[in-house]
Image (cartoon, helix red, strand yellow):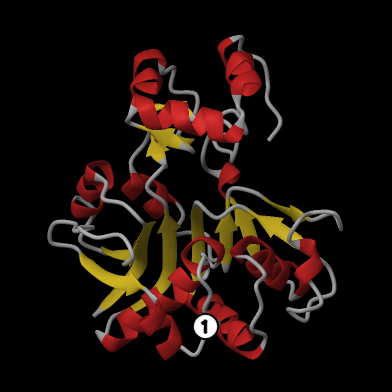
Amino acid sequence: MYYKNVVVLRTNEYSSYWNEILSDLSPDIFPLIVKDSRVKNISFTDLSSVDFNFENISALELKVCNDMQWRFGDYVLYLADWYLEKNSISYDFIWVVEPDIFLNTSLDKIIHNMNYDQSDFCSTYFSTAKDDWIWSKYISEINMNKPYKTFFPFLRVSKNLVRNLYEARRKAPSLANDEVFVASYVGNKNISFTLFSNSLQYNLNAFSYGLPHYVPMIKLFNNSKYEIYHPAFFSFSLFIKNIIKKRAYKKILKRILLLDNED
């Protein structure tokens, strides 16, 4: 069976929001859950899934470590490709999404609008990295000349790039995280890439690491300016916990005052 696009939810929790989105995708898009099996009772209705665990990662002959489900987001691509091949499903692109993303538009629409773009790698942000970035120290370990960085909550990766990244990981096992490994491979190998900002409305006020969003508030005050948010929470308590965790008080205040933030 062939699908041009496969959507993979990388998750360590159940999300009714994403269960509904993935269950309602167009028939030409295949949904798949890659779940952290250390967390029990992650069960999505009528959706295929594969476990992100020591057994499966060892079967792929990749490096394992205690925080790999957090550190190695690119392993999700290899697990998905492994599952799809075992089940005789061919594809062109894998999309990776995370449960703390909120969409102000249709995922179907985003995917189908991108079908014209044949770039091997699409992400929200992509740039060179400074030498003092925490992950840049791994650059020689992964056999790259120059560090690059990207952002992993929302990606599209071609089948060819997935398999090339997998072989590169096998040959150079490292504790380098997903963002430096994948971005540096793309940047140093001159892989074709594009940014979602060419077709989606977002900026650091909407989609970043450090500025949390409360979904009911987005819905209440929505002016349709942004189409994708991260990190976004339906639970007010989780929203507050994330503000505290990331010390985002100043950023929240600037957002209330409609001032631009820097990630």
Q: Nearer the viewer, residue 113 or 100?
A: 100
**Residue bearing mark 1:** 163
Q: Is residue 161 above or below residue 107?
A: below
Q: Crowding at label 1, few (<14), some or many (≥20) Cα neighbours within 10 Å? A: some
Write the residue at 68% across / 21% down.
Answer: 260
Is residue 244 at all visible to an observer of this figure? yes
Amino acid tagged 1: Arg
Residue 222: name its quadrant: top left
Write the residue at 41% across / 90% down.
Answer: 59
Q: Is residue 242 above or below residue 161?
A: above
Q: Is residue 224 above or below residue 145?
A: above
Q: Which of the image's four quarters has the C terminus?
A: top right
**Residue 138 location (% of width, % of height):** 76, 70
**Residue 48 location (% of width, % of height):** 21, 68
Number of numbered labels in the structure image: 1
Write the residue at 25% across / 64% down.
Answer: 28
Write the residue at 56% across / 64% down.
Answer: 71
Furthest residue to the left?
Answer: 46
Residue 139: name its quadrant: bottom right
Q: Which of the image's four quarters has the N terminus?
A: bottom left
Furthest residue to the front?
Answer: 66
**Residue 8 location (% of width, % of height):** 36, 62
Q: Nearer the viewer, residue 247 or 101?
A: 247
Furthest residue to the top?
Answer: 257
Is residue 206 at all visible to an observer of this figure? no
Q: Is residue 105 above or below residue 261?
A: below
> In the visual, does 221 lie left or right of 194?
left
**Residue 197 location (% of width, % of height):** 59, 42
> In the visual, does 205 lie left or right of 9?
right
* Callout 1 secondary element: helix
